[in-house]
Amino acid sequence: MGWGVELWDKQPEIEKRTQDGIDFIANVRTLAAKVAEIERESATKLAALANTFPTPASNSLFAKSWKDVVSVVSATATAREQSSVALMAEVCQPLKTLVKEKTQERSERLKTVAQLHAELAKHAHVFEKKRKVYDKVEKEMLTAKAAFDKLEANDASPKKKVDAARREYANKAQNLEDAERQLREDLDAFNRERTVIYYNGMPAAFDALQALDEARSDSVVTHFGQLLGCLQASIDASQAALQAARDTCHAFSKGEDSTLFIQTIGSGQPQPGDIPFEAALAKNSKDKRQSMAVVASSSPKTPRASTQSNQSAAAAAAPASVASPTPAAPSGGGGPPPPPPPKPSATPQVQMLYDFAGTNDGELPTTATEVVFLLQDDGSGWALVAKSDGSQGYIPSSYYQQV
């Protein structure tokens, strides 16, 4: 159903409806802007919070679980910052433009309606002037008729005056008849103009206002969806990080964590054996340390059968040990030595953007513009780096740039 036909006489209501619709766009934009502001503030606070809880410099399962938990906070901060940016770019700015466009379009449509009303008023004014001419002719006819009736009713009236009054009355009556015919023609012309305005011009103008209002509402609802999409994207990103952290915590095994710790720092050397009596009596502290070191690295620890037998075995073994100290063989037996660690030049270098105090365990203090070596960055928000002096630790991933 169209406004032009169904609401032809409801212009004030149409004007209010279209203005309220444009005002509503501004309300939606204000809501989106407020949400974007809250998202941005939340992102800043969450990012700062995550940076105060760095993950330890360890590859243990426990450290990975904690790292993923902190990553949830970092991922949520990133998602909310992205949501804030998207809300401003995809919702607020387009709605601002929409308000401007619809306000201008509404003004133009109402200007057309005003022009139609002005044209209608002009035709009505012309017809009114012609009707006044008719009214004057009619008044003159009625005056002539009254004069004639008065003279005719008076028997003493001269016949000449009566005849003159009759002719005047007849003349005025003819003038009125001509004026009435002309007025009918003028009225027909006026009605034709009114028909064009009320059945063509006004309906077209009101239908245009209807189209404006419908396009406005459709566009606003579309931006509803974009607003919800921005929020949903933020939620999805947080949920993904949350699920990853849940999976890591679910997969945690205290036994595997202890085993990994052993594999990480264990030397593979056997436990030390008993200290020979001669080594214990060594006068020179240097010789004593050497003797004990030889025993610790070459003599496996065995349970004591008896104090005497162990003392004898120690006495028999001591001279050979002290005389020829040799380092323990690699735990894997013979074969080529392990390859040397990569040279610093083979490791990518990055430059610090900001100062980082690194006050917590596992963190590496750095300064802005300092160049360090990037050892690992797994996307958790923290990167493992090393300095040329061999010191290494974690820094925030957002604090460096590629050299």
Image (cartoon, grey):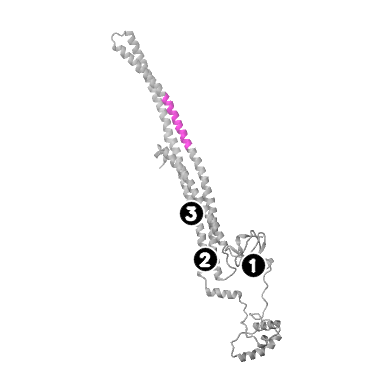
Above or below, 40 against 286 in this view is above
Q: Which numbered disc, 2 or 3, marks the residue that appears first in the sequence?
A: 3
The residue segment tinted magenta is 110-129
The image quadrant where one finds the C terminus is: bottom right
* Front in this rendered view, residue 14 or 373: 373
Above or below, 136 against 75 in this view is above
- Please tell me whether residue 114 belongs to the stretch shown in magenta: yes
Q: Residue 118 in the image: x percent, y percent?
A: 46, 31
Dot 3 falls on a residue whose secondary structure is helix
Q: Which three-letter amino acid code belongs to the residue tagged 1?
A: Gln
* Front in this rendered view, residue 310 or 369: 310
The reply to whether callout 2 and callout 1 are in contact (CB within 8 Å) is: no
Q: Mark 1 points at which residue?
A: 392
Q: Name the residue under label 3.
A: 228
Instruction: Please identify the dominant SS of the magenta region.
Output: helix
The tag on residue 245 is: 2
Mark 2 vs mark 1, CA separation in Å:
26 Å
* Front in this rendered view, residue 70 or 146: 70
